[in-house]
Each structure stands twice: as structure tokens, then as C-alpha cells.
Amino acid sequence: MKILRLEPRPPDQHHAEAVYGVLLQNLDALYITAKRLTGRADLAEDLVQETARKALEAIPKLKDERNTRAWLFRILLNGLRDHVRWKKLWTEVETDEEPPDLNAVSESVVVATAEDVRRALSSLTPETRVLAILIDIEEFTIAEAAAMLQIPPGTAASRLSRARRELRDLLQAYRSRSSRSGRKP
């Protein structure tokens, strides 16, 4: 009787396949996050394409594929940060006509229109906006978001708290205005 020994795939091939899979599963989330942060579809597409290129080139350097999703978002955020340095995008956000599909951040968000949410989110400082998006919309942990942004977790938690408070206040104001104008919130 002959015993067949199955050879495992070379680690590099397995590693690459895992990264490809995570990248494909997260392309939409990367795009939506980039669009929420920039307000521009064209720039979001460019950032996601650059993120994919850099990720694929860096596969051999990736030591642990368990945090591949966070690693991809870190590449995206670093690309956005590089773009901002050159274009000062954080203070000059241009938006597309189509409002993004946002998930709820607080009770006030549930009753606000998508346009109100977009306005409220875009009125946050870049430092608080990115945390609200990463944690409340993309569902990263505070520790993961802090690592992506290269800030201490305590700072991330503080900024997230501030972002949620500001969003709640802004959306409450929208809700109050809607009630006074006779529209349903």
C-alpha cells in the first residue's frame, strides 16, 4: 500500500490567497470609507486602487494575516493622509450630489435623514470624523482604530466620545428644525 503525502501549499501562496480574499471582501467598505472621509467618489476610487496596489505589493512583508482588514484600512488612511498633506483636503471637502448610505451612530441618527447625517458627519473635525467612521460605521474596535491612526487608545476613545456628543447635538438640532418646519423627523 502506497501512502500519499499531501504537500501543504507554500506559505507565500497561502498568505497571498488570504490577503486577496480579505481585499476582495472589503473593497466596498474601503471605497465607502474613503468616500465618507473625502466626500468625493473620484478620489475615493483612486485611494482604494492605490490601497489595493500597495497591499498586493506588500504581501511578502505581512507577517500575520489575522489583522489583514485593519491593515488594509491603515493603508487607506495613510494614503489619504499623504493626499491631505499635498491638497489640504480636510479643510476643503467637496461633496458629490448623492448622499452616502450611513449606518446609525446614535438614536438621533436613526431619525435624521441621510443628508442630515452627511452634513453632521462632515462638520466634525477630521480627527473625530475618522474615528466615528472607523468605529461606529466600519465596526473596528477602539484599539484597532487607534493603531491604524497611530494614536494612543485613550486619545481615540476621547475623540470618539467627542464625535458622538457632537453628532448627537448636531442631529438633535436638525430634528428640532424639522419638527418646527412641520416635517416629520
Image (spheres, rainbow, N blue to C red):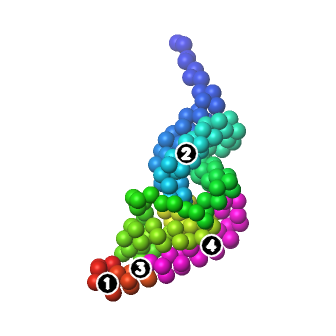
- Tell whether 74 sits left or right of 133: right
Between marks 3 and 4 in the image, the one whose residue lies nearer the viewer: 3
Q: Residues within 10 Å of mark 3 (few under 14, many from 20)?
A: many
- Tell whether 93 sits left or right of 181: right
Look at mark 3 in the image and give the residue it sits on: 174
Which badge, 3 or 4, comes first in the chain's sequence?
4
Between marks 3 and 1 in the image, the one whose residue lies nearer the viewer: 1
Q: Is residue 52 visible?
A: yes
Q: Residue at the spot x=39%, y=67% of the render? A: 114
Label 1 secondary element: loop
Residue 165 versus residue 119 in the image, above or below:
below
| Location of residue 16 in the rendering, given as x and y in whole percent from the top left corner | 59, 34
The numbered disc on residue 73 is: none
Q: Residues within 10 Å of mark 4 (few under 14, many from 20)?
A: some
Query: Mark 3 to mark 1: distance in Å?
Result: 11 Å
The numbered disc on residue 46 is: 2
Label 4 secondary element: helix
Between marks 4 and 1 in the image, the one whose residue lies nearer the viewer: 1
| Location of residue 122 in the rendering, given as x and y in whole percent from the top left corner | 52, 68
Q: Are marks 3 and 1 in contact (CB under 8 Å)?
A: no
Q: Are marks 2 and 4 in contact (CB under 8 Å)?
A: no
Look at mark 4 in the image and give the residue it sits on: 159
Q: Name which residue type carries label 2.
A: Asp
Q: Write down the quadrant of residue 132 in the picture.
A: bottom right
Which badge, 4 or 1, comes first in the chain's sequence?
4
Q: Name which residue type carries label 1.
A: Ser
Q: Which residues are magenta?
A: 144-171
Residue 54 versus residue 178 in the image, above or below:
above
Q: Residue at the spot x=45%, y=74% of the render? A: 106
